[in-house]
Amino acid sequence: MRRGRPPRPLGVPGKPMLTEISPGHWKARIYIRDTSGRRRDVTRFSPIKLNAQGRPLPDRTGQRALDAVMAAAVDVRVDLDDELSDSMTVKQLWGHYRDHLVALGRAEGTISRYDEAAKTFDAAFGGRRLFEVTTATVEAFLKEVGHARGPSNMRTARNVLSGMFRFACSRTPLEVNPVREAKMAENVEAKGRTGGAGDLTVDQLRFILSSVRTSQTPVSAQAVQGRTQSGHTGQGLHPTHGRGLLRRRRPRRRHHPLRRDRATPLPDVRAGVVRHRLRRRDTAPSRQGRPGRRQGTDPGHRRR
């Protein structure tokens, strides 16, 4: 049975050791376990720092050497597990997760919506390392997004964060997904337009306005009268009070002048059935004086 202190987790640095080599010059050492599980000795010396006159400044307490060795230890943690570790920042994780979504063949619209959500949590805590993100941090962020941009964007941000940290849990030493237990804010009012299409870009809006102005759809007399009174010059549209521009409804197919006398060919089987019914109607005895269903005498008959 092995005794003694248990080994440190992978990538977790130990206590740094400082040694003064000469006045104003220090050496800092630290032990850290790398991906192989072996203990690595990381050593750094006091880096040179010059004053305004170009003269070197002494490292009186060894702080510069300590900062250098801790930065090297962080680099060792980032190198764990194929460049993914719990010491990487949220912004770096989003870059790996986005590449993962593209490799899975996600739609461009989905990637675009996730990019917008990534901008919000990047501004909120994108510089934090993964082990520094807690459930309370995520809940505060979701509450802020809900009150600022509405419940729909809040749900989208939560879905992106949850999938991203689930991806991190499967590929890094991170053991707990902080978004899993996060609760969204309740009674959040909707912001802006709800339902329907999403936000339009400038190019999409320009294309829609150009299509509306150049439309050749005919309009009714009421539309022409309303267009003349309002001075609107667009074709196929007429203004309405408080409702914007509306198109004239398309006429029913059976009343359309171009379709009234049009003959539609029938399949051979259907044509034979129609001919058979026509022959029976021509050879059937007259029903004059005999009220039937077509005269509406049958109360259970429903006219089709």
Image: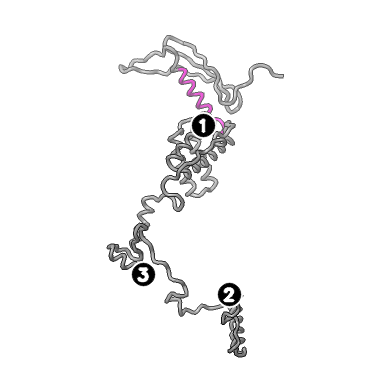
Question: Between residues 104 and 227, which one lies in front from this camera angle?
Answer: 227
- Label 2 Cα neighbours within 10 Å, binned few <14 / some 14-19 / many ≥20: few
Tell me the magenta residue range.
Answer: 65-84
CA gap between label 2 and label 1 equals 66 Å
The amino acid sitting under disc 1 is Ala
Does 286 sit above or below residue 297? below
* Residue identifier under label 3: 220
Q: Residue at (36%, 69%) from the top-left corner?
A: 220
Secondary structure under tag 2 reads: loop
Q: Are marks 2 and 1 in contact (CB under 8 Å)?
A: no
Does 3 sit above or below residue 263? above
Mark 2 vs mark 1: give the one in front.
2
The secondary structure that most of the magenta stretch takes on is helix
Q: How is the image coloured?
A: one colour
Secondary structure under tag 3 reads: loop
Position of the C terminus, as image quadrant, is bottom right
Q: Are marks 2 and 3 in contact (CB under 8 Å)?
A: no
Q: Position of residue 81 (x, y in %)?
A: 57, 32
Q: Is residue 68 magenta?
A: yes
* Residue identifier under label 2: 302
Closer to the N terminus: mark 2 or mark 1?
1
Residue 97's tag is none
Q: Is residue 244 magenta?
A: no
* Residue identifier under label 1: 136
Q: Position of residue 61 (x, y in %)?
A: 44, 12
- Label 3 Cα neighbours within 10 Å, binned few <14 / some 14-19 / many ≥20: some
